[in-house]
Amino acid sequence: MHYVIGDVHGHFETLKALVDELPTEATLVFVGDLVDRGKQSAQVVKFVKDGGHLCVMGNHEEAMCVYGFNIVQAYENSVPLPLHNIWFSNGGVATLLSYGLVQLKEGKPAKVENYREALKAFKEDIAWMKKLPLYLEFPVIHASGKPVVVSHAPIGTVWGMRHMNAMYDTFFRTAMSSRREPDSDTKIFNIFGHTPVQNGVKIREHFANIDTGCYVEDEEGFGMGKLSAYCVETGKVISVERV
């Protein structure tokens, strides 16, 4: 059985709690956004990478690849950290803290002295992320009669572009950041995350949004602050509260 797991965002203890609830023989599939916001991004990446689990690229992996390169350059060329970028403001600092590549001084990230081993692991993880696919298609026909496709953001509306070189940028950007739910006439059953949904996963005949806002502080009772998994073959959903 394949269990697709929603956006973890650095919450490793919650991920372990969810995995403990899944069948031991389950094949784990991740929708991306393993990193940022939570305190244990490095541990989440290690679990997925070293375990050989399936994963697609999310927009937070893309950001780590792009802006993480600048962090590497800052250390290797002995220049100041680039503190002002969109990744830092969207959870990237928490990721660097988890790798041991920064420390907080007066609330601002600063370099550390003993960084070489941490930098090596960080570079290896970026290299792994760069090779993540934009989508995974499974040889399983959903009850709707459509093939099952896992992506980070919904791609049902652009599925026909996936092999068009001229439309690659549009397909890539949609797979990273779209918040538009697939149209009902899409050719696939699309399982994705990216946009947190309230009160449990959102399942329709042609898609399943399984991002239940693991990182969200659910102070208003919207049913978030959970990590969820969706079984491709049965449609069963398993969720745990954030640890």
Image (cartoon, rainbow, N blue to C red):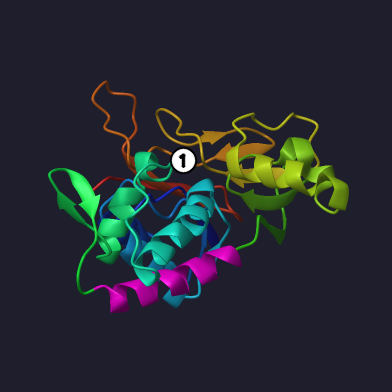
Res 47 → quadrant = bottom left
Quadrant location of the N terminus in the rendered image: bottom right
Is residue 23 shown to the viewer in this render?
no
Identity of the residue drawn at 34% across and 33% down: 224
**Other residues around mark 1 within 10 Å, as few (<14) / some (14–19) / many (≥20):** many
Residue 219, above or below 99: above
Q: Residue at x 30, y 61 (%)?
A: 16
Rendered residue at 34%/41% (across/down): 226
Q: Where is 49 relative to 98, above or below?
A: below
Q: Position of residue 111 (x, y in %)?
A: 24, 61
What segment carries the magenta color?
115-131
Asked whether residue 240 is drawn in magenta, I would say no
* Residue 160 point in image, percent of width and height: 84, 44
> How many marks can you see?
1
Nearer to the camera, 159 or 81: 81
Left or right of 15? Residue 134 is: right
For badge 1, the amino acid type reads Asp
Residue 158 coordinates in the image, percent (x, y):
77, 39
Determine the image quadrant of residue 75.
bottom left
Q: Residue at x 39, y 69 (%)?
A: 77
Is 19 placed left or right of 30 in the picture?
left
Residue 192 drawn above or below residue 137: above
Q: Which residue is mark 1?
A: 211
- Residue 126 located within the stretch drawn in magenta: yes
Farthest residue in the left direction?
A: 106
Does residue 197 show up? yes
Is disc 1 placed on a helix, strand or loop? loop
Q: Position of residue 18 (x, y in %)?
A: 34, 56
Question: Mostly what secondary structure, the magenta segment?
Answer: helix
The reply, left or right, for residue 172 in relation to residue 165 is: left
